[in-house]
Amino acid sequence: MQYIKELDDVRAVKFVPFDVISMKNNWEQEIIKVNKLRRTEGVVHYHTHDVTHIDGIKYLYIMWDYIPGKSLKDYIGNKNLSMQMVVDVVIRSLSVFHACKQLRIQHADFHAGNILIEEPDPLNINGTIQKVWITDFGYGTFSQVDSTPPMDDYDGLCRIIQQCIETIDIHSLDVDARNQFRVLKNDFPKYLHESDPLAGIYARNPSELLKELRKLLETKNNSENYPKHISDFLAAELIGDNYGEWEALFVPKFLATESLIDKNTCVLTGLRGCGKTMMFKRLSFELKAKLGPANILGEDSFIGFYLNARTLAEAFPWLPENRSEEARRQIINFFNVKWCIEILGWLRECANKDRSIDFTWLSEFFSQYLPDNRFVGDPSYGVIYNIIEICSKELQRSKLEDKYEQTGNWPFAKYDFLGAFLHQIQQHHGFSDGKSFYLFLDDYSSPMVNSTMQRILNPVIFRREEDVFFKVSTESTESFFAVGLNGKMLENGPDYKLIDLGSELFKHNRDKSRTKDIIVSIFRVY
């Protein structure tokens, strides 16, 4: 992108080599869509386009308004974001999505590099206001057929929110900004991801999503005086970090508790609202550390870690079938590092309780995977923070940017990494003796986690490993693709235990007293 002067106005000019244009027979869509949106506030205006030659090379150039400022990607990279700026980005994005919906188009390339934050205008009486602009609409439309499908706008916005939140320290924020942080981190993405209109009128409806966002922000601001109602949370993810709500709303009775916590890899199926997320999160070390035991028989036999598969969808918003081999190592690297950070968080909690624990082995273990890194810090405590910081950077590096990197250096892209790490913990620390490790993977359902990604990750999830068991929740057997390593079909029994809550309900209906006890326990909370 270059800038030129025209009639005393600065213009931004995009130059594209003609040999690239020749491979894109629908390149005009970017201009057509922006022209349709010309009256939409916050969309960078198109002026003209033509062909020129520079140093003997033929180029297409497209002329746009010049927006003085930086891209949101730059702000993320510099960790120079305020929460109000992030909220403004979300509001502007939804406003533009609304116009796109009316015109039956989408941006199709929605990422932080295509959002511009304008510098404050000294001519404006409100000189501190920074406007948000959307630019570079992708080539895709709803009717487009292409080998590379357009990126879904809503998934793109979810990923942008996640990237922004990860650069902000909640402890540095005032009360209002903390409320904004929690809403965008925990509450709003669930609404934004929803594509099923039966779940609510907000699904893929920008104007309704904007209402939900404002409602959430207002509710958070008045949460201390807000009375509890049975319909407060449509999904357990919306409770977020409100530990008081978790303590008040969790019911330690579940149709298939015994099967869920036995020493097997399990696939738990059940419709939305059946309690899968509530149970998975409550059995994780994080909530047990905050709230104490969950009062479930057998919970002392394992240490649990929780991950919502929505994180995978946000990190890799598109993954067609023909990119599976290209993307495999990058996705496995991300998946393993994400779990690794959760496990390190548990070790950090252990170190907080007992500063005498020796964690020097961690440096030696991680040096096998990251030989170019120096691990520093007090061996009883600081080294954990150091490794978490290094892993967090690796996590960011693993996310999809412009393309998948098949030949990139992905140090954690090994099927056996998680097992090797957890077994090292067992060898070095008595506080894990005799306990298994349960990895609760929630919402592992298509279309959010598509079949290609499931085929890539299943060899890690369903790998047979002593004392390491995945507990996977999915909406139905149809949303889970039972394919493992080298295309081998996974079988219920030899490879995993299927727990179908629908079947469990019919089974327990023979014992009506137990079903009644569970229902009464749920409503007794209120």
Image (cartoon, rainbow, N blue to C red):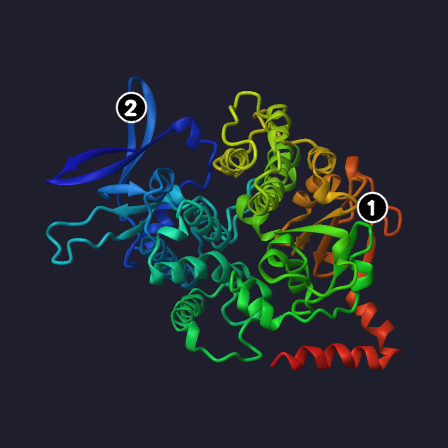
User: In the displayed structure, does residue 12 sit left or right of residue 278?
Assistant: left
Q: Is the C-beta separation of discs 2 and 1 under 8 Å?
A: no
Based on the displayed image, in which of its 4 quarters is residue 523 positioned? bottom right
Query: Which image quarter: residue 206?
Result: bottom left
Above/below status of 178 relative to 30: below
Where residue 57 appears, as percent x and y from the top left, is 34, 21
Does residue 69 sit above or below 173 in this rendering? Answer: above
Distance, label 2 to label 1, CA atoms, is: 57 Å
Q: Nearer the viewer, residue 325 or 221?
A: 221
Q: Quadrant of the C terminus?
A: bottom right
Neighbourhood count class around disc 1 (C-alpha, 10 Å): few under 14, some 14–19, many 20 upward: some
- Residue 341: % across, % down: 58, 41
Whether residue 319 is visible, yes or no, is no
Q: Relative to residue 70, is residue 419 drawn left or right?
A: right
Q: Looking at the picture, which amino acid does disc 1 mark?
A: Leu
Q: Is residue 158 visible?
A: yes
Q: Which residue is mark 2?
A: 53
Report the residue at 65% width, 43% height from top. Answer: 453
Which of the two discs, 2 and 1, sits closer to the camera? 1
Q: Which mark is residue 490?
A: 1
Query: Which is nearer the eye, 329 or 307?
Result: 307
SS for callout 2? strand
Q: Which callout, 2 or 1, points at the residue further toward the start of the chain?
A: 2
Amino acid residing under circle 2: His
> Image quadrant for the N terminus?
top left
Q: Residue 316: image x %, image y %?
A: 55, 43
Classed neighbour count for the residue bearing mark 2: other residues with Cα under 10 Å, few (<14), some (14–19), many (≥20): few
Question: Where residue 323 sits: x, y (%)?
Answer: 62, 36
